[in-house]
Image: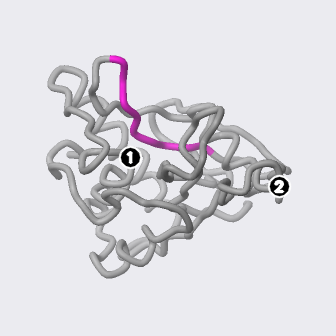
Amino acid sequence: MATVATSWVARNLGSKMNIGFGNHHFIMIQPGGFAMPGGIEIKNAGGTDFLTLGAFNSDEGNMVFEANNESDVGAATEILTGSGLGRFLNPFDWGAQKHEVTPPHQGVAVFAVEVVQRALNYKRNTDSTPLKYTLSDDNCASWVNTLFKVVGVSAAERKRLGQFWGVDWAEQLEIPDHLFN
């Protein structure tokens, strides 16, 4: 089997003219051949399977879960293949960055499955009672931080994992835990 890994990833905000206004945070999982829950499509870049999990601002102003967002998949591909022409064309493009998460209490495959399941729980729990998205606190970074909290990653480790080049907003803040249960 291939390597299983779960990473906290940051990329530039998805806009055509990003001039360094901030990072978008998401999770990248390399399942290494293990089945993941929820029927999320497995992507491949450079011979490595992966999927992405993230939170986004919907047209209604709610924080919604999305797997394999196009821009997240592009950033993951950049990481896995070592490509990334953007930083040469745009001096404010920090490039996609990742920090691999060490599972706190279980093996890497079990941890990856739990992270995917918790993201799916968030989707289920917010379909009927959405959480409002706010750039300053309830955003993609606080979503990733809280999900990793719920699966047992310590506060000190989450603080370290959430630091990237560029502007990070709310990477140390949390949204309600129960949304992931």
In the image, residue 175 sits, relative to residue 109, either above or below, namely above
Can you identify the residue that label 2 sits on?
Answer: 88
Circles 1 and 2: CB distance less than 8 Å? no
Q: Is residue 26 visible?
A: no
How many numbered badges does the structure rendering display? Answer: 2
Nearer to me, 58 or 168:
168
Position of residue 88 in the picture relative to residue 135 (left or right): right
Majority secondary structure of magenta residues: strand
Task: Answer whether residue 57 is magenta in the image.
Answer: yes
Relative side of 174 to 140, left or right: left
Q: Quadrant of residue 40?
A: top right
Q: Which residue is mark 1?
A: 140
Secondary structure beneath disc 2?
helix
In the drawing, what numbered circle is on residue 80?
none
The vertical placement of 164 against 21, above or below, is: below
Q: Position of residue 70 (x, y in %)?
A: 63, 31
Name the residue: 19% across, 42% down: 179
Q: Position of residue 167 (x, y in %)?
A: 47, 60
Residues shaded magenta: 51-59
Dot 1 or dot 2: first in sequence order is 2
Q: Amino acid at mark 1?
A: Cys
Identify the amino acid type marked 2.
Phe
**What quarter of the picture does the N terminus occupy?**
bottom right
Between 82 and 39, the one lying in front of the other is 82
Residue 59: quarter of image = top left
Residue drawn 55% across the image and 44% down it: 52
What residue is at 76 percent from the left and 55 percent from the top? 87
Q: Residues within 10 Å of mark 2 (few under 14, many from 20)?
A: few
Q: In the depicted view, which residue is nearer to us: 163 or 176?
A: 163
